[in-house]
Image (cartoon, rainbow, N blue to C red):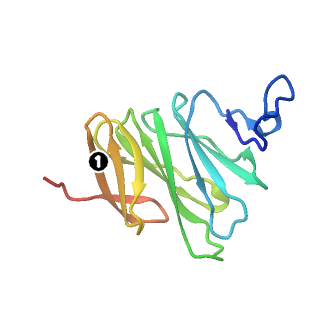
């Protein structure tokens, strides 16, 4: 369960400080990323569930989360971290962007297109090396990197399509 509490230190209702702001999400929530979709007023959050092998979409309204849409299964079944990249300009009504999930067991980074209302499309697997964990974009948003925990290295990609999340591997370096 993910807690989105307002005031720390309150212990009403049997010691749960955030009883009205907690939502159950499955077995093992692991990573979380927020995305302010262009044209939207409230952000969406995406949460990976390591043991269940899925990604949850949470819509927010004035800060309060609620589950939204289908739970997307990630090939391999051990999604860890998640990062979002939204494309568009300020004031745009376009809801475009992509979500990237590191799947530790399958040695993939799975990219999902983020559509209208923050919903995810079917994912595309991008092969990396063993045990992918953390991910980042360079400041320009052109290049994407993922750490490979069990190989002790980093895989690099260029972002081919910001709307679909299509990646292309960078040439191997010595």
Between 100 and 135, which is closer to the camera in this rendering?
135
Residue 152 position by quadrant? top left
Residue for badge 1:
154
Q: Is residue 157 left or right of residue 92?
A: left
Q: Is residue 77 left or right of residue 28?
A: left
**Residue at 43 percent of width and 47 percent of height:** 110
Mark 1 closeness class: few <14, some 14–19, many ≥20 residues within 10 Å: some
Report the number of numbered marks.
Answer: 1
**Helix, strand or loop under label 1:** strand
Quadrant location of the N terminus?
top right
Q: Residue furthest right?
A: 13
| Image coords of residue 3 (percent x, y) | 70, 37
| Image coords of residue 105 (percent x, y) | 38, 32
**Residue at 78 percent of width and 54 percent of height:** 61
Residue 113 position (above or below residue 52): below
| Image coords of residue 46 (percent x, y) | 59, 47
Q: Residue furthest front?
A: 9
**Residue at 34 percent of width and 36 percent of height:** 131
Between 138 and 96, which is closer to the camera in this rendering?
138
Q: Is residue 86 left or right of residue 70?
A: left
Residue 98 position (above or below residue 69): below
**Residue at 41 percent of width and 54 percent of height:** 136
| Image coords of residue 89 (percent x, y) | 57, 76
């Amino acid at each position: 369960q993910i807690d989105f509490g307002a005031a720390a230190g309150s212990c009403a209702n049997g010691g749960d400080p955030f009883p009205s702001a907690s939502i159950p999400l499955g077995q093992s929530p692991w990573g979380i990323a927020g995305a302010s979709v262009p044209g939207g007023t409230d952000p969406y959050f995406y949460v990976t569930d390591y043991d269940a092998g899925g990604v949850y979409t949470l819509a927010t309204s004035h800060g309060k989360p609620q589950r939204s849409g289908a739970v997307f299964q990630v090939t391999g079944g051990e999604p860890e971290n998640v990062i979002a990249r939204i494309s568009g300009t300020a004031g745009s009504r376009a809801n475009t962007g992509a979500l990237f999930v590191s799947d530790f067991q399958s040695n993939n980074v799975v990219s999902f297109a983020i559509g209208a209302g923050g919903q995810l499309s079917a994912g595309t697997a991008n092969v990396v090396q063993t045990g992918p964990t953390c991910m980042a974009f360079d400041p320009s948003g052109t290049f994407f990197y993922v750490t490979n925990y069990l190989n002790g290295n980093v895989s690099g990609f260029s972002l081919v399509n910001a709307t679909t999340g299509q990646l292309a591997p960078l040439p191997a370096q010595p």
